[in-house]
Image: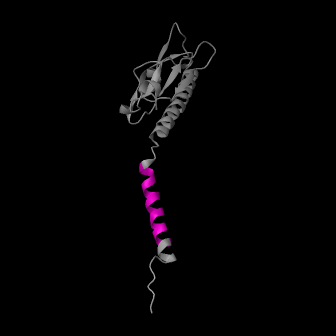
Amino acid sequence: MKTLQKGFTLIELVVVIVILGILAATALPKFVDLSGDARKSVIKGVAGSMASANAMIYAKAQAAGTLGDSTTPVSMTIGGVSGVTVEYGFANSASSLAKVMDLNPPGDFETTVDPDIRLVKAPTPASCKVAYTKAAAGGAPSYAITDSGC
């Protein structure tokens, strides 16, 4: 009398597990939302870009001997961009600083709400921003990152 065995072999089970693993690895990114982390990184990049652009502005103002101050700000042309207002060698506003920055694509950023540069595509743009505090006499500007709404 022949007995019929029912069930799966070990190889069949291993193949099924491997296939399920491949499917899970390809489907996982669709369920993991990394866009918030990406927006936070963009805001941190904007803060770094602001600091770099301001360093360039200061170097140009220092070389030209036109640092300006709070009572007599100086308008400069930097990198082919005119109308950059400078006080104490640094940009006097976020919108003036944004003129020399390469914010790309420009439609993703709101630069008209001084003292902030905001990420428009964030769920809460007012809480996904870099606030710029202009330099005072003998000081340097500061950049405050708010990423709670990113």
Q: Is residue 24 magenta?
A: yes
Q: Residue at x 43, y 21 (%)?
A: 95
Whether residue 1 is situated above or below residue 42 in the rendered picture: below
Of 126 and 98, the residue lying toward us: 126
Of 120 and 72, the residue lying toward us: 120
Whether residue 85 is situated above or below residue 30 in the rendered picture: above
Residue at the front extreme, as displayed: 1
Whether residue 66 is situated above or below residue 49 in the rendered picture: above
| Figure quadrant of residue 33 | top left
Q: Is residue 125 magenta?
A: no
Of 1 and 46, the residue lying toward us: 1
Residue 58 seen in render = yes
The quadrant of the image that shows the N terminus is bottom left
| Figure quadrant of residue 134 | top right
Residue at the top extreme, as displayed: 71
Tell me residue 36's x, y (percent). Answer: 47, 37
Tell me residue 20's x, y (percent). Answer: 45, 63
Q: How is the image coloured?
A: one colour
Total marks shown come to 0
| Figure quadrant of residue 110 | top left
Examine the residues drawn in magenta and state their main secondary structure: helix
Q: Residue at x 42, y 27 (%)?
A: 125
Residue at the bottom extreme, as displayed: 1
Whether residue 58 is situated above or below residue 37 in the rendered picture: above
What's the magenta region? Answer: 14-30
Residue at the right extreme, as displayed: 138
Tell me residue 105's x, y (percent). Answer: 38, 36
Residue 99 seen in render = no
Q: Residue at x 48, y 67 (%)?
A: 17
Tell me residue 29's x, y (percent). Answer: 44, 51
Of 28 and 73, the residue lying toward us: 28
